[in-house]
Image: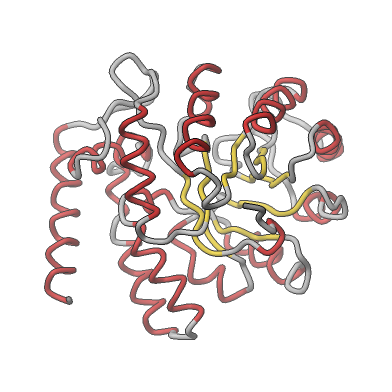
Amino acid sequence: MAFDIRRLEGVMVPLVTPLDEKEELDGKALEALIEHVTEAKVHSLFVLGNTGEFASLTGDVKEAMMRKVKEIVDGKMPVFVNVSDVSTKRAIKGAKIAESIGCNAIVVCPPYFYHLTQDSLIEHYERIAQAVSLPVVLYNIPQYIISELNVETVKKLAKDRRIIGIKDASGNTSYIENLAIYFRNAPFRIYQGDERNIEAALMTGANGFSASLSNLYPQLFVDLWDAFGEDDGLKVHKLQETIRSFGNIYGITRNKIQAGLKYALSLKGICKPAVSEPLPELDKFEKFEIERIMQQYDIRCKHTK
């Protein structure tokens, strides 16, 4: 099935990468996870992002993840793949693998480790866009990457029709607001990557969002998107507040996104809690807190049905 990527919007799930104890891809768990999120009728999948542990996985596991997701999805929805790396050539190599597998678009954050000028970043993205036929989505996540894509750089890159959008996970509400307003009547796609600020982003013109928690409770995010489309502001606000209440599921200091999500998913029988080294694991108190949050939410849902 052909997808018009430039018209894509809604809920993009940044999939966790299910692993076994040897840090190899757990294919059966991945099937269960994708079945879980697609039952909620999410709109697209984002593979190997920060939630998917891309920076600490081997090349073999990354490629296996791409191939298995494409096999399971079988053309039923768009698959975006993060091919970010520490150099342009390495990112291009990942992009060509994604292209050969048949993914629908690639996502690229600035090269990490080195501090780069905005001109260097523009050249980096243009070279990647020239190297493959897949559309390119920018990925701004400065809390993990030394170099940030500033607003003017995004505007310049958007002039290249091969660069079709951005996922912003910075948590900077003014950043995504400026972009959403500037691109309001343009085909350039704006995705909010900070689930605490989905409501504000949609109100200013964002086209969708990519939230880690949608791995666990995808229906919550589909309901929010549908409520926004129905112009039900009160419901959107209530769902946003519910989403914010899940903060401690990522660890008490919000620095264990992968471990927290995987432990929560393990409680649902979807995947093992294994994360790739050296990502931190949860302590006993954090596990207890996740169990409390999930029980509280599930009970609330039962009472409101």
Residue 72 drawn at (x, y percent): 45, 39
Q: Is residue 68 above or below residue 206?
A: above
Q: Is residue 125 above or below residue 37?
A: above
Residue 283 drawn at (x, y percent): 20, 31
Residue at left 43%, top 78%?
227
**Quarter of the image where one finds residue 103:** top right
Residue at left 63%, top 61%?
8
Q: Is residue 98 above or below residue 87?
A: below
Q: Is residue 14 left or right of residue 78?
A: left
**Quarter of the image where one finds residue 112:** top right
Q: Is residue 229 above or below residue 296?
A: below
Residue 280 drawn at (x, y percent): 33, 26
271 vs 124, nearest the viewer: 271
Outermost top residue: 22
Residue at left 64%, top 24%?
113
Q: How are the colours assigned in the image?
A: secondary structure
26 vs 197, nearest the viewer: 26
Quadrant in which the C terminus is drawn: bottom left
